[in-house]
Every structure is written in structure tokens, then in C-alpha cells.
Amino acid sequence: MTTMTEAVRASSTGGTVKKRASRIRSGEKRPAAAFYWMVWPAVIAFAFFHTLPVLIGIFFSFTNYPGYGDWNFIGLSNYVNLFKDDRVLAAYGFSFLYAIVATILTNVISLAIALGLNAKIKASNFWRGVYFVPYVLAILVIGYVFQFFFSNSLPKILSGIPLFADNILTNETWAWTAIVGLGVWQACAFSIIIYLSGLQTIPGELYEAASIDGATPWRQFTSITFPLIGAFLTINIVLSLKGFLQVFDQVVALTNGGPGTATESVTLLIFRGGFSGGEFAYQSANAVVFFIVITIVSLLQFRVLQRREADF
Amino acid sequence: MSSRTRSIRMAAAAVTAVGVIAALSGCASGSGSGVTTLNFFQFKGEALEDFNKIIADFEAENPDIKVVQNQVADADTIIRTLLVKDKAPDVITLNANGGFGKLAQSGVFYDFSEEPVLQTINPAVQDILANLGNKEGEVNGLGYVNNANGVIYNQDIFEQQGLEVPETWDEFIAVCDALKDAGITPFYGTLADSWTGLPSFNALGAYPSQGDFWDQMRAEGENVGPDSEVSFQKDFPEALDQQYELYSNYMQEGYRGKTYDDGNAAFANGEVAMLLQGIWATNPIKQINPDIRAGIFPYPATNDPGDRLLVSGVDVVVTMGKNTPHKEEAMRFIDYMFEKGVIEDFAASQNMVPSVEGATLGDDPALQSVKPYFDEGKITGFIDHQIPPSIPLAAIIQQFLFNGDTDAALATLDSEWAKVAARTIPVTGD
């Protein structure tokens, strides 16, 4: 207990922090034990619940384990078969199409809404709350609400348009757009929050100066707002794309991968093939490949997007 | 019908999984006072009350045995985790699907071949189980009640229109045309739920896949294709064409976007004359309209009435863990379950066909109309149980019923079969 309070005192007295930091480096005094007490449980929990399962998954991807019973090592066969499987390729195609479209829509819409919420409008806190509601609701719940909407309400409201009159969720070509609609609707809530916090970091004097110089609101947006929220744009795009690539609940709630296998995402394929399909090891290999793909995509995005971020 | 409850309720399943495992480990040591406690693993939610009654009666007769019913959601997954952990329940009921066959083959269940109760069961039912898989030379499951997969028809509408139950394919089409001419929609299609394409696929596909078709398919493995000895492309075109004919000509408007529940409601209200479903749909239909008289007839896929086959699955199979320490008590409970009166009550309440020979069926018209096929042994299993679960069969059939492209659907089935065969690497001895 005493070490705990010591640590709190040490960290709360802001002035001494710098001095202490340099002393650690010179090795005169060790950091308080409390820091270790805080770090170790987290490390253990993280390793046990996160790192270990990942390693086990990688391990089983080199076997023919069906999820129960006996198994053998089979080398890289799962990976070789993966690249020959057109169903897997189709799932990657769907996931990327969905993720790219949804990322663009989410970021355009939420940036626009965030700009509105950041302006001096009446009851801005109320509106911010309203836009955050979709993030609070459980995805499966709203998923079923949306499913009812698409299969029962829309056919009646838009009975003149054949695409909607016949339940868009069972349309092989366009079912994915309904999933995009649900995904964007829900993801905007979180993106808006990040954009809002980004917008609030921009000092008001910049806009005052710009309007004195006679810049139009559009010019202010392109020359001040957009460059200065660069870091937030990067993080939002990277997080959205990563999240949308792993789309699962939305698909389950709306189409369950159908009609046919038209909206089968990679995660849904891994879940189905691995658990109900009895191909645990094969889909583990798929998961490993998917993990690598997402990592590469995210790193590429960071490199490209960070280049155009403005420093300030 | 396993695909009936395909919707994923992961959260619920996870919670029950934890609960069941906790419950089972708790029960294991409850035999202190001369009373043996049996773990009874029960997969069928709608049978919970029926089994409670069976257990209460059994316990009254056998005071030295206590039976704890563990009713679980997503039983297929949970039984696997229990078996892997070597915590097999004493008495188990499962749906006899392909997954059950796989488990039976791996030898985790008790061998019933010497038990007298086996002699009381209809051999055609045990054949269906044997086709799913048993450990070499063993009998690992006892069929309890069976379902029937056939065309459900509204007997009142048939009588009003002066129609007879069709016995050949041509008669079947003639009945559909007559209904259409009379302004009655023959069928209600519900393709928004992909699995609802499967009952008719199973029934019509049963004809080309008689004999050792599936053994040959498995032997072909990754070579299955248009040129192989047997294949979907070679043997199934007629079945799929027949299925598509029913869907494309005789369904209501908008059959692509309706769900299973919509179909049951429409049939119950007399909007259509028939449903391409099975006996499991009669309960939900009766909940909407208790007075409906619904019968079932097998899909007559050929033009010889003598060829007709009723597709039937073992809806509930009873088995027990191989190494249960309470073998004698568990067997007593199983024997009790298979007593004629007990199984009759259960089957009537569940609207199923009891497997014990000589047991009488409930007086439901649907049950009565399939009785002759069970008596004569003219029943055959669900073919989707022979197709590996990693093939998205329901999705492929649904897609086919949307676009009618027989060749593409069969080519996809063959290529999926070949791919799964190629990547299923058998476990070697060491």
C-alpha cells in the first residue's frame, strides 16, 4: 500500500518527473515497484488471452486438426490449398470491396457531420449525443432491425422500384450495398467523435485571420481544416479500413453470407469453415494469411497518409 | 432437420457452454448416498418438457437413479468440446446429422450391438444411422424418433379441387397445373432463408444417389468432375431441373424474398396448396391454424409409383459415452426411454415417427400419411448429411434457384467436393 501511494505522489508532482527520468537512465535508482505491479498483470493477461491464442492458431495452421480428435503436421499444405480455393478468393474480393466503399463513405459523411457539430449550432451537445447512439447499440440488435427494414418496410415503401420491392438482401448483385448501409450508419458515430476532437485542436485564431484576409468557408476548409486534421484523418481511415475488412456481425445479421455466397466475408468464411465446417486447421491458415494482409494494408496506409499530414 | 436452426446465436451458445461445463463437472461426484446421478445431454429445445416428464416417471420407478437434464443450444459444438476433454455425458441425445456420423466413426460412443433394445428398432432407421457412420463393426447410436421430408399439402384444398396425391412426376406436374388453373398458388417459396431450398434438393436428389453413390464419390475424391465415374454433373442434372421447374413455374410472386415463417403462415391460412418442406413444419403451422389438415407425400421424382422413396432423418438419436462409469444405470434409463408407451407419447408430442417397431403413431394426418413408408421400409436418409459441412450447399442451391443455371451449380458442387477432398488430409497412424 505504501509503495502505491509513493508512486502516486511521485507521478503527481509534475516538476520532478523529468529529473527522475534522467536518473533512471543513469541507473542510480530503480522505478517504484508499483509500476511493475501495474504492468505485469496486464502483460500476463494480454499474453494469455491475446498472444497465446494467436500462436496456437498459427501452430494449428500447419496441421490437419479438424477441431476435435487426432491430428498430424502437414507442413504448408493448408496454405497451398488456400490459394487454389476460389471461394476464399471471392471472400477476399467481397471484404475489400466492402471495406473500401464503406471507408470512403464513412469518412466523407462523418467529416461533414463533425464539421456541422463543431460549428456554433444550438444544443450541440444534444446533437453529438444523438449521433453517438448507433455506437452504443449492440450490432446484432440493430442488425435485426435493419433486416426487418430491408425485407419488410422498404419493399412496401419503395414498391415501385423493383430492386427494393423484391427485398434487396436477396439480390445477388446488390445485397452488399445494404450491408454497406448498415456498416456506415454504425461506424460514423465513432469517426465523428475522432474528427470532432481533431477539429477542436485547431486554434480559432487561424480562422479569424483567414476571414480577415477574405477567405471563403470552402477555402478555409481546404487550406486550414483539412491539412490540420491530417493525423486524425490517417487514424480514422486506417481504423475504418481495418474494421471494415473484418466485417462479420453486419453480414450475419443481414444476409448470413447470402444470397448464395455473394456476401461471404473472410471472417465469416473462417468462422463457418472452421467451426461448423470442421476445417479448423485450414481456416486457421486462412486467418493467419488474413492477419498478414491486414497488417500490410495498415502499414501501407500509414506510410502513404502520413506523408501528407501537416505538422504544426 | 439440422439446418432448421442454423441461425447463429453465438453469445447464447457461449453462455450455455460455460454453464453446461460447470454443471457437468459439478455433477460428476454426486453419488454419495447410493443414488447415481446421470448426466443427460439433450439437444432439442422443444423437447425439454417431454424429457422432464420422462425423467420424473423414470426416477419414480428407479429411486436409486437421478437424471439431470442438460438442455443446450448449439449442441453440435458443445458435445465436441466435451468429448475432446474426455467428459462425455452418460446419456446423450443428438440430431443424427453428418457431424454425428463423424463423431460415431471416431469411436467416442458406446457400442450397442449386444444390447437387446437394438432388436426393437425399425432396421430401416438403423440403416440411416449406419450410412452416416459407425465405428467399424459397432452400432454407436439408437434412432429414437424420425422426421419425414416430403411435400406438405392442404388436404382440404386437394379435396375441394378433386385432386389425388400424385404418385409419379407427371401426375405431380399435372396437380400443380390444375391448381394454377383453378387460381390457387401451388407452392409458397421462402428463399430468403437459404436452407429452405434444401428439403426439396434432398428429396429429389435422393433418387440419383441411391446405392453406393456416396462411397463412390468419396473414392473419387479430388478427381470428381464431369468425366469421373460418378459426380454431381453426371448424376444430378435431372434432379436439379425438376427442382427448378417447381420453383420457377409454381411459386407465388416474390418467393425469393420470403422467409420460412412467412411460408408457414401462408400455408396455415390456406393461401397456397403445398409447401416444399417436411414434417417439422407442421407444428409451427398448427400454432397459426390448429384446424388445418395437412398431409405429407414423398416427392415422386420418377414415373414409376413403385420407386417412390420417403426421405427421413433420425431427428433424435440416443447414445452414451464409451467410458461412462455408470453404464448399467445409463442403460436402464435408455431401455426405459425406448419402452413403447414412453416413445409413443414422446413422438406424438413432438409430431415425429417413433422408431420402435409396432409403436403406434399420433393421430395427426401428416403422421398417418407417411406411416406406410415406414412400415414398408421405403425410407432413405438426407443426402446433405453425406456432403461435407464445409461445402456451402444451402448457399449453392439457393443461388441456383435464383438463376436456374444447372450447369454452373453442379460444376460448383463438384469443384467444392474436389477441393475439400484435396485438403482433407487423413490422420496417419503415428
Image (tube, coloured by chain):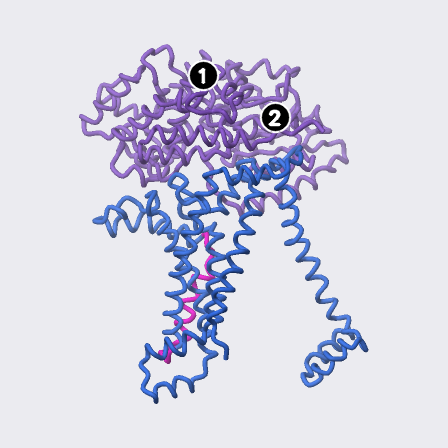
- Give the residues drawn in magenta, as a range: A119-140
Q: Relative to B85, does residue B362 appear above or below in the rendering? A: above
Sequence order check: which comes first, mark 2 or mark 1? 2
Which of the chains bears the disc numbered 2? B
Q: State the separation of the CA atoms marked 2 and 1.
A: 22 Å
Looking at the image, which residue is at 45% across and 20% down?
B228
- Where is mark 2, residue-wise? B104
Which of the chains bears the disc numbered 1? B
- Where is mark 1, residue-wise? B210
A270 lies left or right of A133: right
Q: Colour of chain A?
A: blue
Q: Is residue A271 at all visible to an observer of this figure?
A: yes
* Residue B393 located within the stretch drawn in magenta: no
Looking at the image, which residue is at 57% across and 33% down?
B42
Q: Nearer the viewer, mark 2 or mark 1?
A: 1
Amino acid on which the number 1 mark rests in the picture: Gln
B218 lies left or right of B209: right
Q: Relative to A158, does residue A16 appear above or below in the rendering? A: below
What SS does tag 2 mark?
helix
